[in-house]
Image (tube, rainbow, N blue to C red):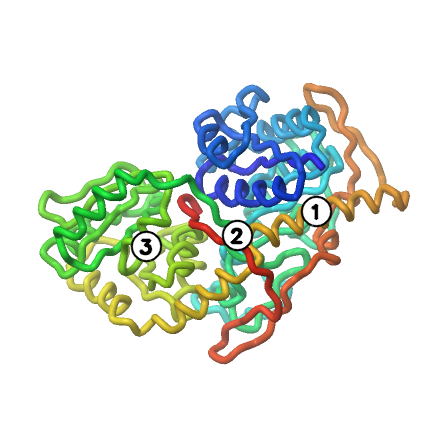
Amino acid sequence: MNVLLCPFSDAGYLYPALAVGRQLRRRGHAVFPLVRPGAAGVAGEAGFAALDAQEYGGVRAFSVAWWGETGAVQYRAVARAAREVRADAMVTSILCHGAILAAEALDLPVVVLGFAAHLWTYGRGGEGERHGGAVTRELRLLELLRLYGLTREQAGLPPRRDRRRDLPLIGSGLLLRGDPALEHSGAELPEGVRHVGPCAWEPAADPAALHRLAGRVRRVGKPVVYVHLGRVFGGESMWPRLNATFTGGPFQAVVERGRSGEPRPAPGADVVVVREPWMGPLVELSDLVLTNGTSSPVLAALMRGKPLAVAPIGSEQPLLSEACVRAGVAVGFPPGPGPADEGVAALGTAYAGGLGERVRELGARLNASGGAAAAADAVVAAASSARAAVHDGRAVEAVTATVPDGPLRTDIGAAPSGAALAGAASPAHVPVQGGGWAHASAASDGIGPDRGGP
């Protein structure tokens, strides 16, 4: 079949989609990544000839920084590209409302790649979350549904009436890249949402750059903290805290500036700032990982057995950070300005080894999970389910939406849902000691490094 990859082109969204695309291509399917121009080289390194999103009218529509404003533009670009490549199925990112709407309008199955943990309300359980976590999930879902509805209106599509509020956002299935241990104890995911594990791929590291960096940290001689910064969301920069923690203290830092703006290291700080399209070798070079709590650095650390310190600022960061602390694989790190001893104490706790056993256990499960192969299974299952529905002559109510290229068929109520994955292999959730979860079954998959973004 022909599969259109249409995630955001930011690394944390694009790399997992490319990992899934590589698995699909190994199985003989044709895969077409639709990316903004700056990401064409990365897609090429993954072995794909990319489609330029701007040629389909998708200016800014594949940048996560503009996700709440360009949904209708994304809808039109994805619809045009899907028609051109005669797509049989699509793979997109969470928050890509335009791509999900295009799949619905074209009556195509679409699998959505999510974060390491579930962000919205659970199907059942989880009410005991601390700090109003359950309320936060509800508010986040309502805000996403509001933006989805606005995008739908801008795209000229009629309103949907679904039995479940979250159904329009999950397409043919929402695949989480983490492990059930990162969900609240006792919670059950909604139907159509499941964990597949890390969908890990990244460009190859530059050997010369890595050699220079390794030489530098060896000369300093202190334990290395890999720091991966995320968005600030209008809050305070972490640089004052980083400079205090890594000036004259027991640790040194390799800081990937990520999406946090311009770096501000102090002259005397044991800090080296990097900006690389790869993360895995930097994590391997380090003794522990400090992150704002975004999915890619969290998963990269756990897959390599590195303990975490988490300093969430906004968006999904607090939820995943709290999940890591609850799972016993992370300690909290103070994100705002403050004295050096607070940051040093937090890193010292993580470095001392008390988290090691839980980190190794969770890392082993992530490395043994299906990952990109399980996600590829889900894409194939969704496409097979959609074909079976067509052959069965399932009755649907058809309406017409218009885009610049002509009419699109929209089958309201028959858009592929989580039920499309019901027949796919799905790990059963089995309670284990300590309030965590374990997979009752998992398929092995070659897991490589991940990087960047969410």
Q: Which residue is labeled 2 in the image?
A: 140
Q: Amino acid at mark 2?
A: Arg
Q: Nearer the viewer, residue 294 or 72?
A: 294
Q: Nearer the viewer, mark 1 or mark 2?
A: 1
**How far, Cα to Cα, is label 3 from label 2?**
34 Å
| Circle 1: element type | helix
Where is residue 129 shown, x and y percent of the image? 49, 69
- Mark 3 / mark 2, whichever is N-terminal: 2
Q: Amino acid at mark 1?
A: Val
**Left or right: 405 in relation to 302:** right
Q: Residue, x 48% and y 60% (percent of image)?
A: 367
In the rendered view of the protein, which quadrant contains the N terminus? top right
- Mark 1 / mark 3, whichever is N-terminal: 3
Q: Amino acid at mark 3?
A: Glu
| Circle 3: element type | helix
Q: Which residue is labeled 3 in the image?
A: 284
Q: How many marks?
A: 3
Where is residue 61 shown, x and y percent of the image? 52, 30
Reply above or below: 178 against 355: above
**Left or right: 224 in relation to 408:** left
Q: Which residue is labeled 1 in the image?
A: 380
